[in-house]
Amino acid sequence: MDAGLTPVRVVGAGPVGAVCALALAQQGVPVCVLEAQPETARGDSRTLALAQGSRLILERLGVWSRLADVTPITRIHISQRGALGVTRLDAGDLNVPALGYVLSYAELAAALKQALRDADVAVEYGIAVARIGASAAAAELATADGRTLATPLAVVADGGRGDDAPQPRFERDYDQMAVVCDVQTELPHAGQAFERFTPDGPAALLPKGDRYALVWTAARADAERIAALPDTAFLTALQAHFGGRRGRFLEAGPRKTFPLKLTWTGSEAGNRVVRIGNAAQTLHPVAGQGFNIGLRDAWELAALAGDTPADALGGAAMLAAYARGRRADVVGGLGFTDFLVRTFSNDLGPLRHARGLGLLALEAFPPAKRFVARRMMFGANG
Ligand SMILES: Cc1cc2nc3c(=O)[nH]c(=O)nc-3n(C[C@H](O)[C@H](O)[C@H](O)COP(=O)(O)OP(=O)(O)OC[C@H]3O[C@@H](n4cnc5c(N)ncnc54)[C@H](O)[C@@H]3O)c2cc1C
């Protein structure tokens, strides 16, 4: 790091903050990270689906080759329960090695932590940022251990957990929760993922190691009850919900739940503070967009910072350019995801048939299928 320049400060070393810090360092921009959790903390058991575009970002940062346990998705089968219409996406048809990749949050977090160490990025672990203030000249971070740190640019990547997070500009509570766990099926996955739309919400099976990661969306009132079912009752309920495309469900790991909400806070252009990843937007997991949009936030911000002269870093012009540049991808991803959730999470007869026709049309019209697949892999710039 150049000792003469005040570093950019990244709040949060989750995947988005860590990717941003690595990319800033790669661009030659001085950067420090503050992370509330201790260095020894291991990421939790959640499963992430990375799009092809996110793989490219991790490759450019030298992180991809550090990941030992990644399962490629080579085919996706999309259907709706109790009605006609199936669409199949195949990596071969799109000339890509995979449509996406499945890995655990903990594995990605560990690889990123090591990459930060190897790149000599200063990370202060166990230091929470309690408050962020900003003036035209600098942002000031008040840390929980009583320091005030000035920076030309504060990058907030705290997952939206900060006490002084601004009110979202747009919010939709789906009244749904995701029940997640690993499951073992009778038939091997062979790289195939399933997305099944039901009136209660979508359910996905993602190939992960020799098992599947299940993301079962249910109404909030039902989700806790489903997650608490004993194993045998849970497997029976899952079989009834998902059907028999992978044979019987044989085993299920410990269940966890998390609330599903669309929030769009956006980045606050003009005051030396920018929010990225889950701090800027949260999405329903139906199309696997949220995490990947967050990685693109991190990458695009770092690229722009690298192109900005040191004295303009974090200034109104740079942050306005960032907000402008991200708008189509973020708002497009939010809209696409929201459309899927609201169109498919109901049992209205005419809509059910229209959805079936939509899936059949997609199956029969390869250019449309390629468009949808590329949007899922690369976002609005796909
Ligand atoms: C409970 C839960 C379960 C999820 N499960 C799934 C799933 O199964 N599949 C999926 O695809 N997506 C899942 N998601 C979404 C996914 O985790 C996010 O898209 C992704 O983690 C966003 O990364 P991020 O780096 O923006 O935020 P995070 O991963 O939340 O990282 C934020 C980081 O900031 C740190 N931090 C927070 N506050 C402060 C502070 N004040 N000062 C300093 N550091 C701070 C935190 O310790 C953390 O390390 C889940 C989200 C939640 C909340």
Image (cartoon, rainbow, N blue to C red):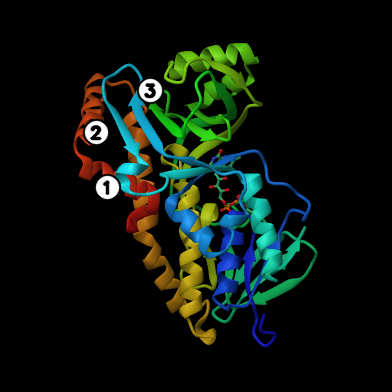
Residue corresponding to mark 2: 363
Q: Residue at x 41, y 48 (%)?
A: 97
Identify whether 280 is placed above or below 209: below
Amino acid of disc 3: Pro
Residue corresponding to mark 1: 371
Question: Is there any visible trace of residue 63 in the rendered image?
Answer: yes
Task: Please tell me which residue lies in front, 136 or 231.
Answer: 231
Label 3 beta carbon less than 8 Å to ligand 1: no
Q: Which badge, 1 or 3, is on the more N-terminal residue?
A: 3
Q: Secondary structure at mark 2?
A: helix
Q: Quadrant of residue 3?
A: bottom right
Task: Please tell me which residue lies in front, 118 or 170.
Answer: 118
Real-space CA distance between mark 3 and mark 2, rounded to the nearest whole angstrom: 22 Å
Q: Residues within 10 Å of mark 1 (few under 14, many from 20)?
A: few
Q: Which mark is residue 127?
A: none
Q: Quadrant of the C terminus?
A: bottom left
Task: Please tell me which residue lies in front, 84 or 318.
Answer: 84
Q: Which badge, 3 or 2, is on the more N-terminal residue?
A: 3
Q: Position of residue 145 (x, y in %)?
A: 80, 64
Q: Residue at x 49, y 42 (%)?
A: 72
Q: Position of residue 288 (x, y in %)?
A: 45, 42
Q: Position of residue 63 (x, y in %)?
A: 59, 59
Label 1 beta carbon less than 8 Å to ligand 1: no
Q: Secondary structure at mark 1?
A: helix
Q: Position of residue 129 (x, y in %)?
A: 70, 61
Q: Secondary structure at mark 3?
A: loop
Q: Nearer the viewer, mark 1 or mark 3?
A: 1
Q: Which badge, 2 or 1, is on the more N-terminal residue?
A: 2
Q: Quadrant of the N terminus?
A: bottom right
Amino acid of disc 1: Phe
Residue corresponding to mark 3: 199
